Image (cartoon, coloured by chain):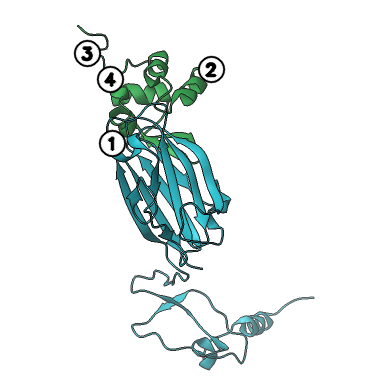
Amino acid sequence: MFMGEGISMTKIECQAILQCDEVICLSNSQTVTVDAFLDIAGFKDCEPNLQAMIDFDGGTKGYRDFLLQLSD
Amino acid sequence: MTTTFSEILTGVKKLWTVSTGADADNAAVTKNPILIGGRYSTTPATRHDGDVTTLETDSTGRLLTVVSGSKTTLVKSVVANNSLITNVSLRIGNTVVNDTNLTCLDINSYPKRAISIYNAYNQAISLTYAAIRSTNDINSGGISIAANVSIAAGATLYIEPVSYPLINTTGIWLIIKFDQGVTPPTSGAVTVYVYGGGN
């Protein structure tokens, strides 16, 4: 089995971790839907915990600072 | 001092006013009409300057209103695909190009503006700048509305007057430039919606 194979995050798990409903507010002028966060940014293939999501972002998807704030 | 029943009736009579006559609706004010509530009419009359009027309602009693002012319209939506942004900077004006053959977007008729940028790439991208210029030239000077704003993968950035007050700066031409973020995206597209309204 390859690393990460079989790992997935459901919408409900994502909403619980990020404490949101359908939309995640990243700032006053930027939002993302939970569906886009999972499907477009690809976090559906990430383990459902905050540290794994920070690692998955890798500083390339634009969510690192937002996730770090949640982990404080 | 005692008050007789007759005196009470006389007092009530003085308080009781029946609103009748031309002052009630659609006529020049001559007295002090009491206006309460609205009225439904299948063919509302044309009022004239200085007339007293009733509030008009529809057949179910809902008050009729007219929203005035200019409406906001979608001026332009532009979609750029993955191949453009992974090569070089991506410029969006009236179309999408990655070279100098770009026509800026004419926003002269829309002094009130808002821009929505949907990054459907699988990586973050950078809004290098959005600017309003006085000439249709991508390389000319101008007013920078926003610069170096990271847009997360899958996210939408709203450039509106509260967060970006310079968006309603007087000018004719709009140009938006993107660059890839830390990592080039491997799928997706960016869509830019420009909305505008008149004065």
Q: Secondary structure at mark 4?
A: helix
How far separated are the C-alphas under marks 3 and 1? Answer: 24 Å
Q: In this rendering, would B77 be left or right of B162?
A: left
The amino acid at mark 1 is Gly
Q: Which chain is cyan?
A: B
Name the residue tied to disc 2.
A72
The amino acid at mark 2 is Asp
Proximity of marks 3 and 1: CB atoms separated by less than 8 Å: no
Of marks 3 and 1, the one in the foreground: 1
Note whether residue B158 is visible: yes
Q: Which chain is green?
A: A
How far separated are the C-alphas under marks 3 and 2? Answer: 29 Å
The amino acid at mark 4 is Asp
Please give the label number shown on residue B188: 1
Name the residue tied to disc 3.
A6
How far separated are the C-alphas under marks 1 and 2? Answer: 32 Å
Question: Percent position (x, y) of residue A43?
Answer: 32, 23
Q: Which is nearer the eye, B91 or A16?
A: B91
How far separated are the C-alphas under marks 1 and 4? Answer: 17 Å
